[in-house]
Amino acid sequence: MRYTDINSDYQKGERMAELRPENTLAQVEPGTNVKVIHVKGKGAARRRIFDMGIVPGAEVKVIRKAPMGDPIEFKVKGYNLTMRKTEAELVVVDVLGRGE
Amino acid sequence: MAVSSENKNKMAFALMVGIIYILFGIIQMIVGLGLESGITDALLIPADIFGGCVLLVIGAIFLYGYKELKAGTNDGVAFIYFGILLSLVFVVIYLLIMGADALCTYGLGMEDLESWTPLDDVKPGLYLGILALMGFLAWKDKFTLRGVSKAGA
Amino acid sequence: MKDNKITIALTGNPNVGKTTIFNAITGARQHVGNWPGVTVEKKVGTRKHKGMDLEIVDLPGTYSLTAYSIDEVIARDYIVEEKPDVVIHIVDATNLERNLYLTTQLMEHGARIVIALNMFDLSRDRGDQIDIDKLSNLLDIPIVPTVGSTGEGIEKLLDEAIEEVKKGPHHHHVVGYGKEVERYIGELATIIQKDERLSEKYPPRWMAIKLLENDEEVLKKVKGSKIESDIKDKLKTIDTDELEALMADKRYEAIGAILPQTCSTCVPKMSVSDMIDKVVTNKYLGIPIFLALMWGAFEITFTFATPFMEIIDMGIGWLAGAVSGMGSGWLPSLLGDGIIAGVGAVLIFLPNILILFWLISLLEDSGYLARAAFIMDKLMYNLGLHGKSFIPMLMGFGCNVPAIMATRSIEDRKDRMITILVNPFISCGARLPVYVLLAGAFFGRAAGSVIFSLYAFGILVAILSAMLFRKTLFKGKPSPFIMELPPYRLPTLKTSVIHMWERGQMYLKKAGTIILLGVVFIWLLASLPAGVEYGSEGSYAGVLGKVIAPIFAPLGFDWRIAVALIFGFVAKEIVIGGLGTLYGVGEDEGALSDTLADSESSGIYPANALGLMVFTLLYMPCIAAVGVIKKETGSWKWTLFALAYGTILAWVAAFIIYQVGSALGYGG
């Protein structure tokens, strides 16, 4: 289970990206690496997301969900960041694949 | 995935300690609900539901570590170390409480604690800690907090 | 710099060891106050170094200098408006990329900067190779490696800071934002320069950048100036939403251009932190582990504190005894029943507060508190609160006073106000003796269930009130949850003890004065007019009890209970003592229980006994809690609101219980 074929996952990710043009950080499963495309919304919360390093082009790894399913933990710019689903939904991403 | 002999030792340890903690946790909760007996008195199990829950949690961490190692995931080791750590944290807590009660009784002569003896504060959370201590001594070089610095933020 | 006096501001991300550096520089020469108008802590310390008097101001920890939170506004207003001689920017050597983001923003402020590359030992030990000279050259900022916990590098840091001040004005390298944005910045800066008042106070480039970022605080500064309309017209032609992303990106890009040249191995790897997180945020075990740790902290706080509380109690008792030896009359009574009892009521909680805040400091500095918020956020969010509200709520079961003080970790004002206002409904330890006595006297074998239900009822009221406040007084969603989970660190004794001591002092000083006033007031009520027995029918307290008795009549409370409730304001367990006095049985609780249980003569039946317990649970918080509510909300209005809301709620609940109970035949 843990070592599924990375390639097929990658293709699945691509297909998903095609089917659903807006793949957000909130939808991505833990263990997935993604690349930020852009951040929706406006105002202070969006600026905060940028400040924390979630900028277009940044690579983010989804680490885990909290025990109750929300918030979500990410690794970005070498540190661990957590956001609620509501905030993660603003971040549109491209799925890169799974793994370390 | 082949399990190393080092991990085999840890699995045996985790399984044994985990079951013991869970067992004592359940008994302590039952005693907490008012079902005492000579045996539970002899084992110094207090009527303490929450304390029983803590034992249960510690036991569950060990068993989870066992389960992970059995499935071939090396992360299991982290659970075992953390289980050891948490048991020792509670040993320290219970020792401090014992110290406080001793101070109340012998130092201050508080009325409610006139008949207190140190044995009153000996409970599974304290003496089962010896098992955790054995684990700690066996693997103590693994507890160097490499990569964990002094804090202050 | 005036007369060898230098002002140094400390900035940095949260969790980079800023407090440790501050403590290492200033030692005990520091004091804690508030920033004007807000309840954000302001720490100022002094230090003599090389013949210079240094004043060190510890700014709130921030990731950025946008107007996201009050902390950020304070930090940047201080740098822009107070213009410290030099800013020491503390950077976590193990996480350069995100930390340098703040550096790029500081550079735009035009301040003189010295970077303290903190936790350098850690980065060295893990094999990072940071080319400090090159990094310093590229940024054009002096960099000093430091280790806050051992004090390594602190002297050199201060040397550099003084050196930097002596150099005089200085223009930093700045991030280039690309052709299009730079053109906008240039145009806006030109407009800003037309207003001398503004451009003298704020660097025009900085202001232009903030305007492009749609920064509300900076927009406010422009408001009313003669260039307001010009700026507004200009901004209308620009799609600022688009620019925000671009500008943040450019800043990270600038860092990305520098880092690879200066640090070859700064790639984070799987660490001990990740291993610990695997366990403590585990899907199944995360919450049980959290609850177990909280229970442990609770046990320590309230059990370990007992002997120390006993010592204080004995000291107070001895003093009171000495005073009563002075004979009778108003002075010994004021000293004994008023002042000493009042000071005692303040001091008695001190062991609890010290231990609790020491533990919280350990949890916070280790990094676990951020995980606790992560784990509990979903639940709290559904109740209209924030993940960080959970710990204060839980602590309320011990004592509401430190619980309310612990809300300081919640940044958002609304989140924090709601957490403070509902906290008194969490049944604290002092209310338990009242429950035990009354439930024991009137409910016999069901006493345990009654007491448990009271705790549950308190939680329910807290939850419903939180939801109500969120829908009415503090409208809007809980603040966004975008937070760092910092790496685990070993807490240092020095930092946690200093933190504990600060909280203890704050409690004694600020809450203490209000508590003392309240206690003296109650004493006056109970002992005037001159010559009456303390708290008896003839005293003003007794008279007042009789006057307000009609208000309590629908609840089935007579004047004696009314007086006991007034006494309960000092501390809720005093309700018992008050009843003892008024029913003429003194301090013998067994006799009091028997007397009360005799419904015919006491006038208390199960229905009003339950009503009295609920009333004790909900009505105005004790004086100590009121003192900290005032201190933490910074507002008498909200303090009075908390008093009134709780008391009205208590009345309504007790009324319903008594009336329904009576209708069912439990009210005599």
Image (cartoon, grey):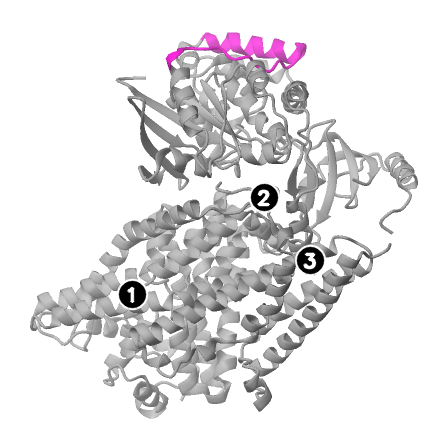
Task: Indicate yes or no whether the magenta region holds residue C186.
Answer: yes
Query: Horizontally, is B94 left or right of C609 in the view?
Result: right
- Where the N terminus of chain C falls, by quadrant? top left
Q: Which residue is mark 2?
A: B148
Task: Indicate yes or no whether the magenta region holds residue B107.
Answer: no
Query: Horizontally, is C178 left or right of C602 in the view?
Result: right
The label on residue C570 is: 1
Residue C542: tell me if it is visible.
Answer: yes
Kind of residue at disc 3:
Phe
Give the x, y percent position of residue C424. Answer: 43, 61
- Where the C terminus of chain C falls, by quadrant? bottom left
Give above or below for B10 relative to C150. below
Q: Residue at x 65, y 57 (%)?
A: B139
The label on residue C87 is: none
Instruction: Give the camera-side residue of C305 and C155.
Output: C155
**Nearest-to-viewer mark from 1 and 2:** 2
Kind of residue at disc 1:
Val
Disc 3 is placed on an element classified as helix
Query: What chain is tagged by disc 2?
Result: B
Neighbor class of circle 3 (other Cα within 10 Å; few <14, some 14-19, many 20+) is: many
Give above or below for C652 relative to C290. below
Give above or below for B33 relative to C223. below
Instruction: Give the camera-side residue of B115 and C416.
Output: B115
The label on residue B79 is: 3
Query: Horizontally, is B96 left or right of C346 in the view?
Result: right
Distance between mark 2 and mark 3 Cα atoms: 18 Å
Q: Residue at x 52, y 18 (%)?
A: C107
**Region in magenta:** C166-194
